[in-house]
Amino acid sequence: KLCSKLRNLRQEQLDRLKIRRSLVNGNVQLQCLLERMNEYFKVEGTKSRKYPMNTDLRLPVNENKMKVLMGNNSKLYNNSGLPETYYRYFEVALGYFITDGLKSDYWKNYDFQTYSQLVGGEEDPSALSSGSKLQGNKYGNRLLFMAIAVNTTLSADNLGYERGLPIYNQWEDFVKDQMKEMPPSCRQGFQATVGERNAWHWIKVQQILVKNAVQGVALGLALALLILTVATMNWIVSLLATLTIGLITCCVVGVIPMAGWKLGVLESLNLTLVVGLSVDYVVHIAQHYVREHQSKRLARVQSTLGHVGISVLSGACSTLGASVFMFGAKILFFFQFGIFIFSTVAFSLLFALVFFEAVLGLVGPQGSVGSLAPWVGQFVDYLRGKTRTDVNCKGCGGKGFVKKDIGVETN
């Protein structure tokens, strides 16, 4: 029934599940072992030289049908050796069908090549005592699983998790609904992608990689903001610098689809390094800007470019030159790592010397605006017990202060 339902799904459902239709006849492309097995035994039962007239071997399988099959194939089966408790008659039918009656070249026929990969089993010791040839293989003993193969329009190589995850959920919902209509013994069925590229598994991996990459970038930016604030002691400059680093990171992330890559293990690993590599040039510019003695922002920017700009440019050129040699690497990781290093340094240089300097020239703090030094000084004074009315001790080497209300010097 499940095979029949799959073949007769509405076009809307086929589109949601991305099921492929044949270009020749327009039928749904699926491989249903039970349908083919039923056709096989329908023909097998008509072989009058082997079976009595009106022999019915079609599905569903039962003990009487299989004993007729086994009794008329005495070279393959030994009914007298079967214990009374034997019940694996479906496996008998399956083994006979898959091997086409244990023909010498059964592995060459279409049914074996098509359907053998859709079933799996193991030897059942209780059935080996019969001396049966067919009952001694994995198809004629204990069945472990049986699958229905459905061909889809999806390509595992180009399937990202954003597109693939909703399709995966559609399949999950469809299979769960179908399992509710199955007999209790068959309700443990599930859907999966198989083969060298397990698409559903890779989609889940991609989802985790994206989550980890986003968390890594966010954590890196948060730490960068904290470190820049401590290094520059100016919250305005540190915010502008962190914004610049965030834009650099966005540009580097944009290189991934431009290069035709999907987010994988290597890309996720490299993304965790982007924020750290982006900080270098920006922090040099920010540090010199806040330490510049001139109060006007444009004068600070000019001084910063004159003193630090050439050093930043020289350092970037050496790193860019070193990363170019990795473009010829045969190992994918080193090639991608070279691309990430080159693009990160290139964007960092561009944003540090152009964007960041332009922003500082337009809205950068002037004088002591945004400086945290007064706040830090007040906090230190609070810990020392110094109030606003107290003055520093001139004869204490700057380590003490004088309380005016009592005229006592305190270290």
Image (spheres, rainbow, N blue to C red):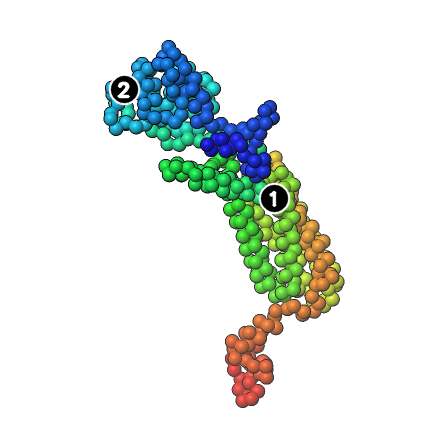
Residue at 68% x, 54% y is 352
Q: Which mark is residue 119?
A: none
Along the line of sight, the residue nearer the viewer: 327 or 50:
50
Task: Determine the residue positioned at 60% across, 39% down.
Answer: 261
Name the residue located 34 percent from the left edge and 22 percent from the top edge: 65
Residue placed furthest toward the front: 54
| Residue highlighted by disc 1 | 340
The amino acid pointed to by label 2 is Asn
| Residue 43, above or below 374 | above
Task: Pinpoint residue 291: horizontal percent, then vertical percent.
Answer: 66, 64
Q: Is residue 67 left or right of residue 264?
A: left
**Is residue 52 visible to the viewer in this orientation of the structure?**
yes
Does 99 sit left or right of 404 as displayed?
left
Which picture quadrant has residue 298? bottom right
Tell me how far mark 2 sits from mark 1, CA to CA.
69 Å
The numbered dot on residue 79 is 2
Residue 235 lies left or right of residue 131; in this view the side is: right
Residues packed near mark 2 inside 10 Å, few (<14), some (14 to 19) or many (20 plus): some
